[in-house]
Amino acid sequence: MGMAARAESKAKRGRRRGRRPKETFSSIGAEFFKVFLPHLTSHHLMIPPDFVKKCHRIIKERVTLKDTNDKKWHVDVEKTVKGSVFLKNGWPSFVTHHCLTPGDFLLFQYDGNYSFIVKIFGTNGCIKEPPPPTTTHVKIEPQI
């Protein structure tokens, strides 16, 4: 029996014994996307159920969202009795800060420690730059 045939035979025996193949999914780098629709996603955002199934260990009571400027928002996570998972408190601040508009495309990438990097694309298909960090405005009085 050749090497390939032995490997196939071993795999079949494993399936018959009820063994499941090892899952190769890694949480780091896991991604999901959402389209911003104000009437559905302004106050809370549902995390896709399949993402929750695959990554249930990384979704705790609170996660951190980071934009491409590395500014952070701490957002509460709420799980419903039906198993849906939503980003809640803290999400509206993220929406407001980034001036999200209908049709914006948000890409969430898990980067460890209950933290997601969020990239935002406009309806033109290009990445939207986050607003610059707030600066203190100093009024200069003219000298007399």
Image (spheres, helix red, strand yellow):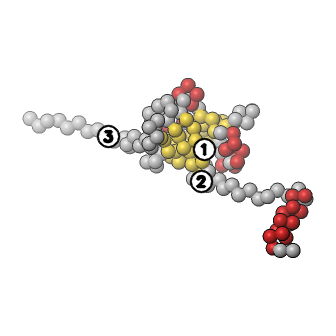
Residue in the image at 44% along x and 33% along y: 99
Give the spatial CA distance, label 1 vs label 2: 10 Å
Which quadrant is the N terminus positioned in?
A: bottom right
Earlier-in-chain disc, 3 versus 1: 1
Q: Which amino acid, mark 2? A: Gly
Of all residues shown, which one is farthest toward the right? Answer: 17
Q: Depth check: 5 or 33 in front?
A: 5
Residue linked to disc 2: 29
Residue in the image at 58% along x and 41% along y: 33
Give the secondary structure at mark 3: loop
> In the image, residue 134 lies at what x, y percent?
37, 41
Q: Which amino acid, mark 1? A: Phe
Earlier-in-chain disc, 2 versus 3: 2
Left/right of residue 6 with respect to residue 25 in the rendered view: right
Which of the numbered marks, if any, corresponds to residue 136? 3
Residue linked to disc 1: 32
> In the image, residue 127 lies at what x, y percent?
44, 43
Mark 3 or mark 1, whichever is nearer to me: 1
Which quadrant is the C terminus positioned in?
A: top left
Left/right of residue 63 with respect to residue 95 in the rendered view: right
Left/right of residue 128 with respect to residue 2 in the rendered view: left
Residue in the image at 52% along x and 38% along y: 105
Q: How many marks?
A: 3
Mark 2 or mark 3, whichever is nearer to me: 2
Q: Are marks 3 and 1 in contact (CB under 8 Å)?
A: no
Residue 72 makes an appearance in the image: no
Residue in the image at 46% along x and 48% along y: 68
> In the image, residue 118 lies at what x, y percent?
52, 45
Left/right of residue 139 with respect to residue 7 in the rendered view: left
Q: Depth check: 44 or 19 in front?
A: 19
Give the spatial CA distance, label 2 vs label 3: 36 Å
